[in-house]
Image (spheres, rainbow, N blue to C red):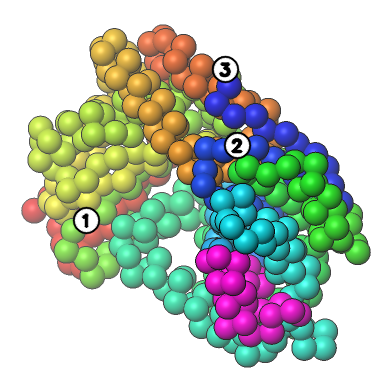
Amino acid sequence: MSFFQEKQTKLNGITVHTVKTDKYKTNTLVLKMMAPLKKENVTKRAILPFVLQRATERFRTTGDLRNHLDELYGASLFADLSKKGENQIITFRMEVANEKFLSEKTPLFEEAISLLSDILLRPLLKGSAFDEGIVKEEIRTLKQRIQAAYDDKMRYSNLRLVQEMCKNEPYALHVNGEKDQADDLTAENVYEYYQQVLKEDKLDLYLIGDFEEDAAGEMVKKYFDFSANTHAYPETEQASKQHVEEKEVIEEEDVKQGKLNIGYRTNCLYNDDSYFALQVFNGIFGGFSHSKLFINVREKASLAYYAASRVESHKGLLMVMSGIEVGNYDHAVSIIKEQMAAMKNGDFTDDDLNQTKGVIRNQLLETIDTSYGLSEILYQNVAANSERTFDELLDGISHVTKEEVVESASKIELDTIYFLKGKGAQNNG
């Protein structure tokens, strides 16, 4: 028996994904907007969702809009940004009480669809531009978000690794945009880009909860009435390095703890058959507290404050993150390389394999315990142009063999070692 059933329908150029379920107490709407990462647009795109969620034609101040959410029995609205492969994703998420549980029969679900469409299609305008005051406020907030990534040295070292590793690839761009472009944003040029977004973005709307699917479809057709409905999303080829050569980058900042980040090319993407084995590989290598990195780098050698790895499934990267004493640099790099060599040699047990598959399964099941987590799992398919079901995902993980993990490891290539150390500190003091 499947965990859930997803239906897909094309309505007004939007792909509408419905999951009818009584598992959750609320109904959830998640709108995903995808466009290729481009240097000329990345900062305009980074500010756009936060301008749109501030005010609409109907609710002309942020206070009015938030009061309306309160009137919808405390409905919530969030905007977010992310990267998947070479694409930049805008996400709007609304959660609203299920009117079936209310004594007063307010059409909350329809009100939520109507409000979400207002935010996307009927924003507050002043002439042929967004409200200048709102844009200026959001520029200040955007610059703070960008600066925060520089102030948090764990995030900064990961950002610098990606920038060095993916030079000349769109993936090197930060999802929050470029600091030097923020001051060039205006109410006019952000609005001009917004019009391009309406024409070109790939739009996916997830409706998850206990509602009538046919009625929901009619509501989407009614409220998401695009006037320029081309959605000419330009499909892009995955940019990847043809030749990988190990390089080392060492920089200094005012930090007490060194940040050692190592980037590998996995030569495997989400829709590849070997994806399942790569996930299990990562689980044994560095994904969990029972993994080789945690046990050997942190626990046995006491070299790191933290040591873990994660996979960027839509870009084909494996990223190792660790925090170390500066003097332990060479030793830490050496042990991390040893753990990778051990994986390539099949130096792990059947217990390691089975424990990891069990933990990944539990992690996936925990993810779909929330409606938002469920939408994120489903959107993996859209981002990868894949049709893998959740049941196939679980099944694929459960059938991974030791030989497949070793085969997956054999394709992994070390690309860049990035080390952030304190000013004037010696690597091996």
Number of callouts in the render?
A: 3
Q: Distance between the residues labelled 1 and 2?
A: 47 Å
The numbered mark at residue 1 is 3
On screen, residue 120 above or below 245: below
Crowding at mark 3 (Cα within 10 Å: few <14, some 14-19, many 20+)? few
Q: What residue type is labelled 3?
A: Met
Q: Which amino acid does label 2 sit on?
A: Thr
Quarter of the image for residue 188 reads bottom right
Q: What residue type is labelled 1?
A: Gly
Residue at image position (42%, 57%) is: 159
Crowding at mark 2 (Cα within 10 Å: few <14, some 14-19, many 20+)? some
Residue at image position (68%, 44%) is: 211
Q: Is residue 254 left or right of residue 268?
A: left
Residue nearest the observer in this picture, 34 or 220: 220
The mark nearer the N terminus, 1 or 2, is 2
Which contiguous range is marked in magenta?
47-74
- Kind of element beneath mark 2: loop
The numbered mark at residue 21 is 2
The residue where tag 1 is placed is 258
| Residue 61 is a magenta residue | yes
Residue at image position (32%, 65%) is: 152
Residue nearest the observer in this picture, 164 or 182: 182
Residue at image position (89%, 54%) is: 230
Q: Residue 75, percent across and down?
A: 56, 63
